[in-house]
Amino acid sequence: MAKANLLKIQEELKKSLKEDFVVKLDTNSISKTTPHIPTGSLALDYLIGGKENANGVKPCPGIPRGRITNIYGNPGAGKTTIALQTAAQTCMAGGTVLYIDWENEVEPKYAAELGVPISDPTKFMLVQPDTLENGLKFMAMAAKDGVDLIVIDSVGAGVPQAMFEKNEGEAPAVGLNARTWSVYLPKLKGLIAKHNTAVIGISQLRDAIGGMPSFSGPKTLAQGGKAWQYYSSLQIKLSVVQKEKGKEWDALQGKSIETVTGAVVRAHLDKCKVSDSVHHEADFYLMSGKGVDNERTVIELAIANGVIAKKGAWFSWMGPKGEIRGQGLQTFRDNLATTEGALMFLFNQVKDSLSGTKGGDTATPAKPIVSKGAEATDLDDLFSDVEELDEDFGDDI
């Protein structure tokens, strides 16, 4: 069998294409954590890639950079919360975020509560484009400029320009949004890979178009069509498995009423190209108006892993300033919260217990990789501003 000279081929291609597209691999390539951004949920980060592999490496404890992540589920499952918390983590680490709000429903007060620096335009930019194409222009420009995270909320809410140009009474084109994504998503995937930008696309669940009905009810699909399933490296389904309720005083009724105070949310990895966690699940807790309850997750994981001792109704833990005890979980939790530095110390202990390492993971956004890529492909004539949009994606794809 003839032996090809790969190094010679590499040099010839480099001269022809004016760039080296060869990925440099060595023995260290399998002992590195994928550049990532924490989600703000300890349980979700561990599920995605926080468990050490055979090489002693946590593959990707968070949203991978340079990749597309699709988060989908029914309303109220915490999709926007996870996206906003990831945005907050990005900014706290010195990164930048572009948040595309096609649904026009991002609450500034809630975003600020989760730690998003809404008043700092150098770190966080919220845009509400009128069309899908205009949103794509923002994405292309942001990725080229090295933005660390782009959030799309939501994938199905962006309306293609062609929908606004239909005559009255003309039937709408079925699946136009999905077809638009099928054209631009592979281009976006190539662009963010070159610039190390993380992308989160939020999708609602909808009934599938066409198909035969089943005894289990209508078939549902995530918005955006199959392109999002195919081009995503990580696809997370969020489901509410239990609503948590409490009592609060209602002045209008003059009595205490039952209200929803939070939820237990289950994350299922439908697809995972950054670790071997595909089809694995994990539960985390949401507090209404406050986001993910990591404190509760940490305490429960600490009990499950023997970090916190449980004897009957008593809980005890040896912290950095002595033993903390409590009869009943809530009492123990209150005592823990009033001890300065105790929760963070316990948090690190739990992370070490889960990973089998010392010190935990402190990943921060990596420096953006700025480079130029191959020539863009022609676009479908379906879109009215196709030439202008092509210029934004340009030859950088």
Image: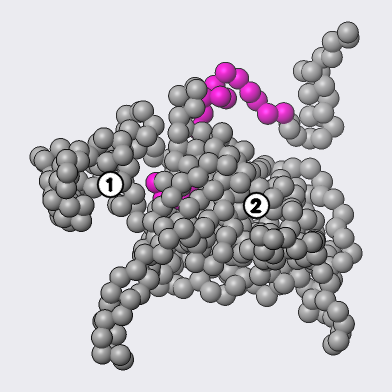
Q: Which amino acid type is shown beneath numbered disc 1? A: Ile
Q: Residue 174: where, in percent of width, then height?
A: 82, 69
Provide the residue designation for mark 1.
Answer: 299
Which residue shows up at 56% across the image and 24% down it? 30
Magenta-highlighted residues: 22-42
178 vs 5, nearest the viewer: 178
Q: Of the residues shown, which amino acid type is indicated by label 2?
A: Lys
Give the quarter of the figure containing the N terminus: top right
- From the viewer's perspective, is residue 291 above or below residue 157? above
Residue 244 within the segment the image draws in magenta: no
Residue 28: x and y in percent read 54, 21
* 290 horizontally vs 62: left or right: left
Name the residue furthest left: 322
Q: How many marks?
A: 2
Image coordinates for residue 135, horizontal then vertical, percent: 67, 66
Say whether disc 1 or disc 2 marks the residue closer to the N-terminus: 2
Given residues 304 and 384, the one toward you in this image is 304
Residue at 29%, 85% in the rendered image: 250
Q: Residue at x 80, y 61 (%)?
A: 211
Residue 26 appearing in the image: yes
What residue does disc 2 label?
Answer: 144
Asked if residue 38 lies in the magenta stretch, the reply is: yes
